[in-house]
Amino acid sequence: MKFVFCMLILLGIVTHARAREYSDTLLTVRAVMIQGNLTTKDHVILREMKLKPGELITEALVDHDEKRIYSLGLFNKVELEVKPEGEEADVLVQVDERWYIFPYPIIGIRYRDFDKLYYGFGFVHTNFRGRNEKLFASFAFGFDRWVSLTYRNPRLTEDDVSLGFEAKYAKLQSLSVETDVYDQTNLKLGVEMGKRLGLYTSVGGWINYDVWEISEPGLGRTVSDDGRDAFISVGGNFGVNTRDVNDYSTNGYSFVLFGSKHGFGESPVNFFRYGFDARGYTPIYDDVVLAGRTFANFAGGGEVPKYQRVYFGFLERIRGYFKDGREGEHIAGGSTELRIPLLMPRYYQLPFEFVKEFSTLRYGLYLGLFADAGTVWFRGQDVFQRRWFSGYGAGLHFLLPYSFVLRTEYALNMEGRGEFVFDLGAAF
């Protein structure tokens, strides 16, 4: 199994995607014009583009800019048209805006497990003030209960400083796989700031105040003996993202390096975390794509309470052991996929226009062949002596309108046990 995991790492970090260079034009950009953005400000679109006045126009750059703009999640359709004017050309960006304001009922599953149902009501504005600002408010009941408010501004200042804040009060059921499920209450207040250093690179930092309360204190459930932990956390990250379409990538790569410190001053909480997440996507034959991911998250310092441990079987999954919970202080894993297009992404225009924002639909279909591997462990344990769990299989990946991805897959694990996987979103 160690050999399988090593192979996954080698496949997982797919470096720069193959660049397709074109020399089919010697035209340079004279001006960039935008049509269709009734709500979205021009600068939100322009900051994603490589094609700027004076830039040589190539088919690769046209394709790049179309996909980067689409990845904003603000448009149903994005098309770039080159209009020659002598030795120069105007670039016309035509967008079809989505519906941005959604009051909605909440009915969902926690940690991708259909036995963990929650329900409630929420409100989201995905393009607040036309500046790609995100505003979320929600409350829910069921497996987990919460009320929350979140705001994200990706461009607070002209030099691309971002700002966000979050306030949340939740009653959650524990993730622990070692003990019975128990209730825990969490109050979280957080602020984050970031800086975009170019088209692909960004840095960020955050500070949170957390209060965790357990009605029945137990060993390791909280650091404090009375079942109440209150502490400040600070963290930061550095990231690079050249992916073409974020919801289902077929070209480019991303890398995130992060670290955080939890607990200061008189708080008994005193530990830190650090790790990375690397993903790559490269075409290997026509539109067939080899995709890979490798990641790790480590802990150090003092005691790590159960609510800050890491898990497989919840947010992170190994297909073949999809619902099997595994718990530890450290986690590492890798995945690789071969993404074979059966129906390349395309658009369908409804013959009638009841609501304009829902009349242009993007869809596609891929066959995915995959392999996953990973493990969790505690300090004092030898990771190379731990059992590495792995699974492999195949499935269909449906690309649906409004950036939804639906996966139906079948996986086999190390014991030869098979399982069907029904999941939302790309695996990575």
Image (cartoon, rainbow, N blue to C red):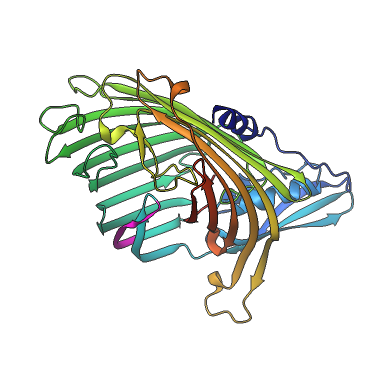
Q: How many numbered marks does the figure carry?
A: 0
Report the front residue among 242 and 307: 307
Q: Residue furthest front?
A: 415
Q: Quadrant of residue 273?
A: top left
Q: Is residue 174 left or right of residue 394?
A: left
Q: Say which residue appears at 50% left-offset and 33% top-offset.
A: 333
Residue 77 pos. (x, y %): 63, 62
Report the front residue among 206 and 143: 143
Q: Quadrant of the C terminus?
A: top right
Q: Is residue 376 above or below residue 281?
A: above
Most prominent secondary structure in the magenta stretch?
strand
Residue 88 visible at all: yes
Report the front residue among 411 and 130: 411
Q: Is residue 221 magenta?
A: no
Q: Is residue 272 left or right of residue 23?
A: left
Q: Say which residue appears at 64% left-offset and 73% top-offset.
A: 349
Q: Quadrant of residue 75?
A: bottom right
Q: Quadrant of the N terminus?
A: top right
Q: Quadrant of residue 262?
A: top left
Residue 161 pos. (x, y %): 48, 36
Q: Residue furthest bottom?
A: 352
| Boundaries of the magenta span | 112-122
Residue 242 visible at all: no
Q: Say which residue appears at 73% left-offset and 49% top-offset.
A: 288
Residue 230 pos. (x, y %): 19, 31
Q: Say which residue appears at 25% left-offset and 43% top-offset.
A: 174
Q: Is residue 348 left or right of residue 417?
A: right
Residue 291 pos. (x, y %): 64, 42
Q: Is residue 114 magenta?
A: yes
Q: Is residue 14 above or below residue 317?
A: above
